[in-house]
Image: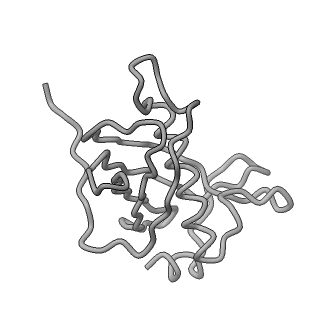
Amino acid sequence: MARVKVALPDTFPFAAEIPVRITDLNYGGHLGNDALLSLLHEARVQFLRTIGMESDYDPVSKLGLILVDVAIEYKGEAFYGDVLRVQMAANDLSKYGFDVVYHVHNQAGKEIARAKTGMLCFDYNVRKLRLLPEGLAARLR
């Protein structure tokens, strides 16, 4: 069976630290796959704030980003009380969007996951894609 492989960039310009909450655990007693995706979303919003976006959606203009795909390569377990260090970088910029690549470790440096989310610029007023603004593209580079 073919496995998902997430290629990592050489450098990560941003990292967020996010604790694993008790509600993030599944019946196996470790971080659930659904919870990891939510933690990646939180980390991505923190990353976007550092480049001048308040979030991935502006309720006034109704312009934002929409997640179009995700790939997660699980490498290890995380548990309640762990503090995850989520390193992030943007890559594969295109006419309409970009990817965010994540490298996740726990506080002891153990690799937990590698992930990638495809993000496209979206106009929620007309429910259509919009061009990646040049200013945003420059900050992502």
The image shows residue 69 at horizontal and vertical percentages of: 44, 43
Which residue extends farthest top?
27
* Quadrant (top left/top right/bottom left/bottom right) for the C terminus: bottom left
Residue at 35%, 42% in the rendered image: 71
The image shows residue 48 at horizontal and vertical percentages of: 58, 67
User: Where 138 sits versus 16, above or below?
Assistant: below
| Residue 92 occupies quadrant | bottom left
For this rendering, which residue is in front, 94 or 57?
Answer: 57
Residue at 59%, 75% in the rendered image: 50
Which residue extends farthest left?
1
The image shows residue 129 at horizontal and vertical percentages of: 61, 54
The answer to whether 54 appears left or right of 48 in the picture is: right
User: Where 26 sits versus 4, above or below?
Assistant: above
For this rendering, which residue is in front, 132 or 100?
Answer: 100
Residue at 43%, 52% in the rendered image: 84
The answer to whether 38 appears left or right of 30 in the picture is: right
User: Where 8 sits versus 135, above or below?
Assistant: above
The answer to whether 128 appears left or right of 112 in the picture is: right
The image shows residue 25 at horizontal and vertical percentages of: 49, 28
Q: Colour mode?
A: one colour
For this rendering, which residue is in front, 23 or 37?
Answer: 23
Residue at 37%, 58% in the rendered image: 101
Count of labels shown?
0
* Quadrant (top left/top right/bottom left/bottom right) for the N terminus: top left
| Residue 94 occupies quadrant | bottom left
